[in-house]
Image (cartoon, rainbow, N blue to C red):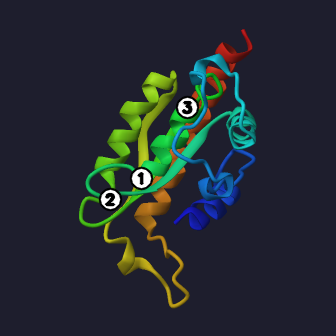
Amino acid sequence: MAQWFHAFASEHGPFENYLVDLADFELPVYDEPNHPSMQKYEHEHTKAWSRSVAAADAYVFVIPEYNHTAPPSLINALNYVYAEWNDKPCAVVSYGGAAGGVRAAQTVRQMVTTLKMMPIPEGVMVQMAWDLLDEQGRFKAGPEHEHSARTMLKELERWAKALRTMRTA
C-alpha cells in the first residue's frame, strides 16, 4: 500500500516525496529519559527519527487497521518527538476489511492534534485490501482510490503552504 501511494504521489502530487518505513528506525517502546518536548534526545535512533520528521513539511500516514485502531508502531513513533511535528498537516491512507481502516484513521487524526498537527479530513480508504492485490502481491488501485488520493494531495498542499508561515514566523 505504501509503495503504491508513494509512486502515485510522486507522479501526481505537488511534493517531493520520501517513503519512510518505521521499521528502518528500529524505535523501541519509548526509551528516552526526557519528555519529547524538551528535545534532549540521548539515543541515536531518536535523533535519526527527529531529523526525518523535522525534514518534512507534510505527512501521509499509510496504515492498516487492527482491532479498530492504528498500529502501535505508529503511535509509538508519533510519541517519540514533539516539536518536529508542530504546525504541519497530515493525511491518512488507511486499509483493512469492510471498514477500510477508517477507525484507525480517526484514531490518528485525534492523536495528532495533541502534537499541534493539522489532520485534513480528506483521505484514502481501501476496503478489503487483500482482494485488490495483483499476482505479485502489489496493490492495484481503482479509480475511486486514485480520485481520493488526488483530492487529498491537493488539500494537503494547501495546508502545507498555509502552515509554513506559522513555522517560519
Q: Secondary structure at mark 3?
A: strand
Question: How dense is the environment of label 2, judged by Cα within 10 Å: few (below 14), some, or many (20 and up)?
Answer: some
Residue to which mark 1 is pinned:
71
Q: Amino acid at mark 3?
A: Pro
Rendered location of residue 130, percent (x, y): 38, 77
Residue at 41% across, 78% down: 132
Tell me the CA gap for discs 3 and 2: 24 Å
**Which labelled disc corresponds to residue 36?**
none
On the image, which quarter does residue 56 sit in? top right
Q: Is residue 150 above or below residue 110?
A: below
Q: Earlier in the sequence, mark 2 or mark 1?
A: 2
Q: Where 158 falls versus 169 (above or below)?
A: below
Q: Tag 3: Cα neighbours inside 10 Å, few (<14), some, or many (≥20)?
A: many
Viewer-proximal residue, 62 or 122? 62
Q: Which residue is mark 2?
A: 66
User: Where residue 109 sits: x, y (%)?
Assistant: 40, 36
In percent of width and height, residue 36 lies at 59, 24
The residue located at (33%, 56%) in the rendering is: 101
Q: What type is the residue that disc 1 sits on? A: Pro
Residue closest to the far bottom: 135
Foreground tag (3 vs 1): 1
Outermost residue toward the front in this view: 33
Do labels 3 and 2 touch, CB within 8 Å? no
Judging depth in this view, the residue of 17 and 24 nearest the camera is: 24
User: Mark on residue 89?
Assistant: 3
Disc 2 + disc 1, Cβ < 8 Å: yes
Q: Earlier in the sequence, mark 3 or mark 2?
A: 2
